[in-house]
């Protein structure tokens, strides 16, 4: 059987394609891109210079008011109860107004009589003056003076009774007790059909979102406390929550056990913070010559030679990298370490996985 040979000639384009494939296969693969590590951070802000002290206290409303009726009477109606939110001008309670209405009616009648007496006295005085002008000597000077005196007396009497009428109107208006400002009813000491006196305390009101922590400072520490001193407030009722506060009142005289009462205004508004809650206040009581130090989580520290030295990784927002920064540190407080130098307020410090970081490494903040 004859053998046939089939020969296929490669064209120039085919040779070029084949050569490019061979070259491509011989090139090394591109390097894998480095994974950008996400880091957990904390912003340096909590001062640690001085002596950290904790004080127990109680929450009080920053704005409070005890209100009462300005007139005595029998309470006809009480329209609010403890815990109710009220608006300025809202009616809280009413007195029986019948006696006050009678006083107003009587004052109106008295003013009416006084107006009539004044009109009569004015007419008589004018009549006598006209007679004197037309017929001098017909009316004695004494009679004319008496007519003028009667007119002045009637005028003053009308003024006096008009004032009594205004007082009766005011007393009637005061039989309605209204809220002086937007507030919450903190306590109530009155019921319907109860007889109350003028000025007797009936309700305690407080502004809902303005709260303070009231504590007492020993006499040995009061010289280190000043207006504007920042603090932190914790509530046993809400574990894990920390609220910033500022000292806004320092008493000049000592109270019980030679302790000085002070008050801190709680910065954040929180409807769960109510008067009467137990508060634990932390203050940094520093001396005049002490340098500022800061607290950071102990997990942020990378140790080095000395026990008082170490490194932390500070995040640079402009380059999204971390920089290994040398610090000097001191004591440990509640899983935090006191940094005496190397950091400033506002620095962003990595707090976890620092052993896997290196100087200049590109990272991203966790959650971004």
Image (cartoon, rainbow, N blue to C red):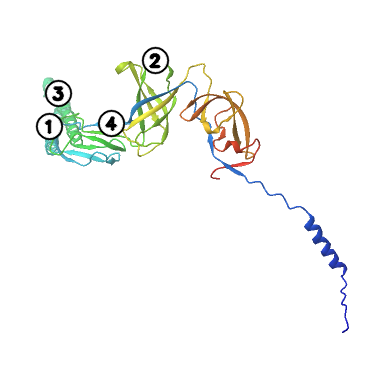
For marks 1 and 4, the one nearer the N-term is 4
SS for dot 2: loop
Residue located beneath label 2 in the image: 220
Camera-side residue of 261 and 312: 312
Q: Earlier in the sequence, mark 4 or mark 3?
A: 4
Q: Which residue is mark 3?
A: 149
Q: Position of residue 15 (x, y in %)?
A: 85, 65
Calculate the distance from the C-alpha at mark 2 to the C-alpha at mark 1: 75 Å
247 or 276, which is in the foreground?
Answer: 276
Quarter holding residue 12: bottom right
- Residue 117's mark? 1
Marks 2/1 in contact by CB < 8 Å: the verdict is no
Location of mark 4 (residue)? 65
Q: Are circles 2 and 3 on residues that touch, CB within 8 Å?
A: no
| Quadrant hosting residue 176 | top left
Q: Residue 288 or 280: which is nearer the viewer? A: 280
């Amino acid at each position: 059987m004859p053998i046939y040979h089939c020969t296929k000639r490669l064209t120039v384009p085919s040779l070029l394609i084949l050569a490019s494939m061979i070259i491509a296969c011989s090139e090394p693969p591109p390097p894998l891109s480095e994974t950008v590590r996400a880091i957990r951070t904390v912003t340096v802000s909590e001062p640690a210079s001085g002596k950290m002290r904790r004080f127990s206290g109680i929450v009080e409303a920053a704005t409070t008011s005890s209100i009462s009726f300005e007139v005595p009477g029998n309470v006809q109606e009480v329209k609010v109860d403890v815990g109710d939110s009220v608006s300025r001008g809202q009616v809280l309670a009413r007195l029986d107004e019948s006696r006050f209405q009678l006083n107003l009616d009587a004052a109106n009648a008295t003013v009416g009589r006084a107006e009539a007496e004044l009109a009569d006295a004015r007419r008589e005085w004018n009549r006598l003056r006209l007679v004197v002008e037309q017929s001098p000597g017909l009316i004695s000077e004494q009679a004319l003076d008496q007519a003028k005196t009667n007119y002045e007396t009637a005028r003053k009497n009308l003024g006096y009774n008009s004032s009594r009428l205004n007082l009766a109107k005011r007393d009637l208006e005061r039989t309605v007790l209204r809220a002086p400002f937007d507030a919450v009813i903190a306590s109530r000491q009155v019921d319907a059909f109860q007889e109350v006196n003028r000025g007797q305390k009936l309700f305690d009101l407080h502004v809902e979102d303005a709260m303070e922590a009231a504590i007492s400072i020993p006499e040995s520490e009061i010289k280190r406390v000043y207006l504007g001193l920042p603090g932190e407030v914790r509530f046993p009722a809400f574990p894990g929550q920390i609220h910033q506060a500022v000292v806004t009142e320092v008493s000049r005289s000592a109270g019980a056990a030679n302790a000085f009462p002070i008050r801190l205004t709680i910065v954040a508004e929180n409807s769960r913070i109510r008067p009467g809650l137990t508060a634990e206040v932390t203050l940094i009581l520093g001396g005049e010559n002490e340098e500022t130090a800061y607290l950071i989580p102990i997990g942020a520290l990378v140790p080095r030679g000395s026990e008082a030295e170490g490194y932390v990784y500070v995040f640079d927002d402009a380059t999204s990298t971390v920089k290994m920064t040398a610090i000097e540190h001191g004591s440990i407080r509640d899983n935090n370490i006191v940094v005496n130098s190397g950091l400033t307020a506002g620095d962003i410090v990595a707090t976890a996985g620092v052993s896997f970081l290196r100087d200049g490494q590109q990272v991203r903040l966790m959650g971004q």
